[in-house]
Amino acid sequence: MSKKITLLGSTGSIGTQSLDVIRAQGYEVYGLSAHSHVEKILQQIEEFHPKYVCMTDPDAAAKLDAALAGRANAPKLLTGPEGLKELAALDGPDVVLNSVVGIAGLGASLCAIESGHDLALANKESLVTGGHLVTQAVEKHGVQLLPVDSEHSAIFQCLMGRGKGELKKILLTGSGGPFRGRPREELEDVTPEQAVKHPNWSMGAKITIDSATLMNKGLELIEAVWLFGLPPEKIQIVVQRQSIVHSAVQFSDNSIIAQLGVPDMRIPIQYALTYPARVPGVVPELDFTTLKLLTFDVADEETFRCLAACKKAIRKGGLGPCAANGANEEAVKLFLEDKIGFLDIGRLVEAVVDSDSFGGDYSLADVYECDRMARAFVRAHL
Ligand code: NDP
Ligand code: MG
């Protein structure tokens, strides 16, 4: 069955892999968005002929506008964060896939849901910063929230519609990152070049750093709390070095169901787009004649403080996770600019989480204010 997709963040790692899936399935692209990569989105426009395109960065938007001038069948250009929300809300697609990075994706997620669209969500920061708003909107508008994050897709697949009542716990797997087993003293001097190399996955810069600090696993734990409605104590982090077991669920009878496959994001992306159907795709099969070893271990929260900080943040509730996320986004940016050390990221995220109680209900305005304050806290504590 053909589908129409609006893809937000199409120039990124998930965005380009989503286009691989869309190309292979012969799906139609209704809208695309990017932030800064003008040449890349021009190529995508050329190939996929979207009706709408949004460029969020103003300079890039002006360049794209000039490049599209006079072209026959040029897409309508929307600009800035408001344009992104407008694009997410437009009637036309069967599903909106959000693969923007960071809290910049939250407004678009909410707009897509509030306009009645099913949302395939790679942008985990939407749930981390505004989980309560996103899940409430999903319920109110009766739309499907389809996880794209590989672990959450795995859990979603293992659950196969079974209720929370039968679920005892979630086993959320992670590779442990490139620095697993290294003592803290050795991590003080890790450079951005070393941290942007992940052993198993090829991803955008921000999530690659998050994987090295284990912040990504902390964000994913919070994402799982919102997606599957379990308290954080019932989500166990399991280090699965080979990234073959993408996560598992344990039912009340202690039977465990896991999802396995090669580490390739195009499986969870495709499942979110074809759900509930399974169809042949572009990803090769897992070869059990060469797969000799699967190892399991516990995560080292003493060394990787980001994971401990995220657990504290979700236990505090309210805006705690939003504060942790905002501090992390700012700290990762500073680390990539060589302005702080690798371990400072965890120190700063933990310090923000410890700085307030964060409890209670919140509005969207509160989320953005908390994000702003967390970033300011980080800059003030350099
Ligand atoms: P990338 O950095 O590769 O891509 C991010 C995308 O968002 C790009 O299209 C970028 O545009 C756009 N973007 C950047 N800043 C803004 C902004 N301020 N406003 C609007 N759009 C913006 O990230 P990834 O693809 O790696 O990750 C995307 C999301 O998916 C993240 O939330 C991540 O956690 C999640 N995820 C990623 C996985 C992976 O394997 N990469 C796995 C699971 C989840 P441009 O490039 O034009 O600047
Ligand atoms: Mg993941």
Image (cartoon, rainbow, N blue to C red):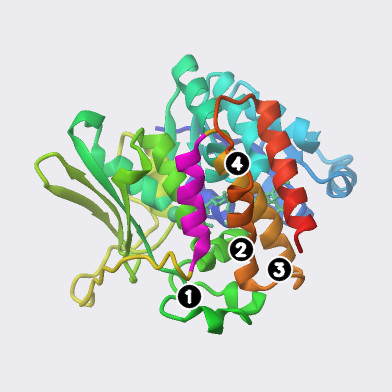
> To which quarter of the image does residue 48 belong?
top right
**Residue 2 x, y percent position in the rendering:** 45, 33
The residue at 38%/46% (across/down) is: 152
The residue under label 2 is: 347
Classed neighbour count for the residue bearing mark 1: other residues with Cα under 10 Å, few (<14), some (14–19), many (≥20): many
* Vertical position of residue 253 compared to residue 302: above or below: above
Screen quadrant of the C terminus:
bottom right
- In terms of image quadrants, where is residue 129? top right
Q: Amino acid at mark 3?
A: Leu
- Residue 29 spot, x, y in % from top left: 59, 38
Label 4 and label 2: CA atoms lie apart by: 16 Å
Q: Point out the stretch of residues depicted in magenta.
A: 304-317
Labels 1 and 4 touching (C-beta < 8 A):
no
Residue under numbered circle 1: 178
Q: CA distance from mark 3 to mark 4?
A: 21 Å
Q: Is residue 316 magenta?
A: yes
Closer to the chain start, of discs 1 and 3, is 1
> Depth-wise, is mark 4 or mark 2 nearer the camera?
2
- The residue positioned 57% from the left and 33% from the top of the image is 130
Q: Nearer the viewer, mark 3 or mark 4?
A: 4
Q: Residues within 10 Å of mark 3 (few under 14, many from 20)?
A: some
Is residue 170 shown above or below 78? below
- Would you say the magenta stretch is mainly helix, strand or loop? helix
Q: Position of residue 141 (x, y in %)?
A: 49, 16
CA–CA distance in space, label 1 to label 4: 26 Å
Amino acid of disc 1: Pro
Q: Say which amino acid is labelled 2.
A: Arg
Ranked by sequence position, the earlier of labels 4 and 2 is 4
Query: Ligand 1 within 8 A of label 2's CB?
Result: no
Residue of label 4: 322
Instruction: Tell me, for residue 336, which label it has, or none.
Output: 3
